[in-house]
Amino acid sequence: MAMNPIGAIGTGQTSSNPYGSYYSAYYGNARNYLNYRQMMPGNDHNSVNSSDDTVKKAGRTSAPSECQTCKKRKYQDGSNEMDVSFKSASHISVKDAPAMVRAHEQEHVANAYQKAEESGGKVLQASVSIKTAICPECGTTYVAGGETTTKIKYPVDKKAAEAMAEDTGLGKMFDASA
C-alpha cells in the first residue's frame, strides 16, 4: 500500500497529527529546525556542520578549516552600555557565534526592561536582529553581528505638559474673521 503523505484515511496512522509520517519521511529524525545544508545528500539530518570543511569551494582562496579571516574575526560591542559583554574585541568561533551574539543582544533587552522599570516606564517593543555575511576567503556564512531595538514609553509629567502648553500659547486666543 502506498503511503499517503498527509496521513488521510487508509494509511493506518493513529496519531493525532496527520502530517507526522510525512514530516518524518521528509526530514528524518531531526528534532530542531533545519537549514538547506542539512538537507543536501550525504549529510545526516542531525548535524549542522558538513564534513567538507577541508575542501576548498570553487572561487575561494581557502578551505573553511584553513581560513585566516575566520580565525582572526573579532566581535566588539559598539553601544554605550557598560554592563554588557564584548566591550573589548574578542574572537568567537564560527560555530559558537550565533549563540554568543544572541545572548549578548539579550543582555541589551534585559537592560531596556530594567531601565524602564527604574523610571516607571513600560517597554512597548524590543526586537533583536542578527546579521549574517559570507566570508570572502572561504565562503562560509557567519554571524556578522546583531542589533537590538527597543521602544520605551515613559510617564508624562503633568506640570511639564502644562508649562509647555502655556509657553506655546495653545488654547489662549482665538482669532476669526467673517
Image: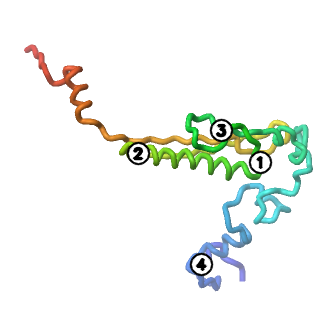
- The kind of secondary structure element at disc 4 is loop
| Disc 2 from disc 3: Cα separation | 24 Å
148 or 40: nearer the viewer: 148
Q: Which residue is mark 1?
A: 94
Numbered badge on residue 118: 2
Q: Is residue 132 above or below residue 48?
A: above
Q: Earlier in the sequence, mark 4 or mark 2?
A: 4
Q: Earlier in the sequence, mark 4 or mark 1?
A: 4
| Disc 4 from disc 2: Cα separation | 56 Å
Which circle, 1 or 2, is nearer the viewer?
2
Dot 1: within a 10 Å radius of its alpha carbon, few (fewer than 14), some, or many (20 or more) residues?
Answer: some
* Amino acid type for the residue under numbered disc 3: Lys
Which circle, 4 or 2, is nearer the viewer?
2
Q: Is residue 63 above or below residue 28?
A: above
| Disc 4 from disc 1: Cα separation | 43 Å
Q: Are marks 1 and 3 in contact (CB under 8 Å)?
A: no
Q: Which residue is mark 4?
A: 8
Dot 2: within a 10 Å radius of its alpha carbon, few (fewer than 14), some, or many (20 or more) residues?
Answer: few
Residue 178 picture location, percent across and down: 7, 14
162 or 129: nearer the viewer: 162
Q: Earlier in the sequence, mark 3 or mark 4?
A: 4
Q: Earlier in the sequence, mark 2 or mark 3?
A: 3
Which circle, 1 or 3, is nearer the viewer?
3
* Amino acid type for the residue under numbered disc 2: Glu
Numbered badge on residue 1: none
| Disc 3 from disc 4: Cα separation | 56 Å
* Amino acid type for the residue under numbered disc 4: Ala
Which circle, 3 or 4, is nearer the viewer?
3
Q: Earlier in the sequence, mark 1 or mark 3?
A: 3
Q: Residue at x 91, y 50 (%)?
A: 54
Q: Which residue is mark 3?
A: 87
